[in-house]
Image (spheres, rainbow, N blue to C red):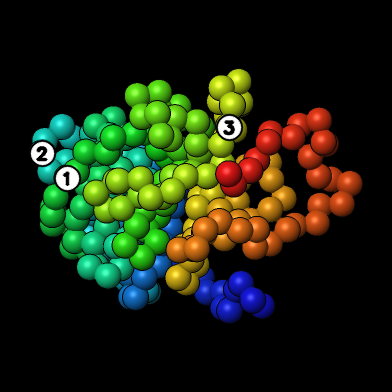
Amino acid sequence: SEVIEDVRWVKLEEAHSNYIGHISKVEFYKDKLFVEDSETGIFVYDNNGRYLTSIGSSGRGPEEIESLGHFTLDKANDQIIINDDRRSSLVTFDFQGKFIQSKSTPFRFGEFVMLNDNFVFHTNKRQNPHFAAIANYSMVIGTNQTEIVSRAFHFKDEQAQIKIGGYNQLTNYGNQVLFNPILSDTIFQINEKGIFPKYIIDLGNRGLPNRYDFNINTN
């Protein structure tokens, strides 16, 4: 199909140091599989499922992660970037787990991915009243220094109270990013030119009633 070329099952090696209870994200790159357990950490396997290492020790030290958020891969530099949610910082490691750097972020967000040299941040309606430029936007594109390039999906103050959780609404796909908002039948494409509807899922009479229109827009 246009989206899926191949399906393969990989059994992950078990060890005392990599028990997985709740998988929140999986990324496959080159010959490595990155698996995030939101409770215990990020584990790295080879493409046959053999355990290699874990990344981002839990703790309050300068090279540790206090509150594990989402991660993304910097494929140009073979690095993994983790959101330390409590510290509001992006922490970078190499693929072997060696600490590279930590940078503070000026706003709160949930998921994030890389788009060439920029980051795409999904705030999931986390309000950032201290940062007026993005205070009521759920999608923000910024540089690697977290300077704002553009923003999208504006929401009203009362809509910020409507929060429905979900993982992996942002997905890297080739040289673009796909975004599927919760309760939406539309999958959006994000690239250097902007944000556009890419796919529309025909749900028939099983779609969300019009009275639950949450004013999803890309302004």
Of marks 3 and 1, the one in the foreground: 3
Q: What residue is disc 2 on? A: 62
Residue at the location (56% across, 36% down)? 154
Tell which tag, 2 or 1, sits nearer the viewer.
Answer: 1
- Dot 1, crowdedness within 10 Å: few (<14), some or many (≥20)? some
Side (left or right) of 169 relative to 205: left
Verify CB contact (< 8 Å) between mark 2 and mark 1. Answer: yes
The residue shown at (35%, 24%) is: 130
In the picture, the disc for residue 155 is 3
Q: How far from the left and from the top, in percent, is residue 146? A: 29, 46
Residue 38 in percent (x, y) is at 38, 41
- Residues at discs 3 and 1 in contact (Cβ within 8 Å): no
Tag 1 secondary structure? strand
Circle number at residue 102: 1
First in sequence: mark 2 vs mark 1: 2
How much space separates mark 2 and mark 3, taking CA atoms? 36 Å
Label 2 is placed on what type of residue?
Pro
Mark 1 residue type:
Ser
Tag nearer the camera, 2 or 3: 3
Q: For residue 61, which quarter of the picture?
A: top left
**Where's residue 158, x and y in %?**
60, 20
Position of residue 36 relative to residue 32, above or below, is above
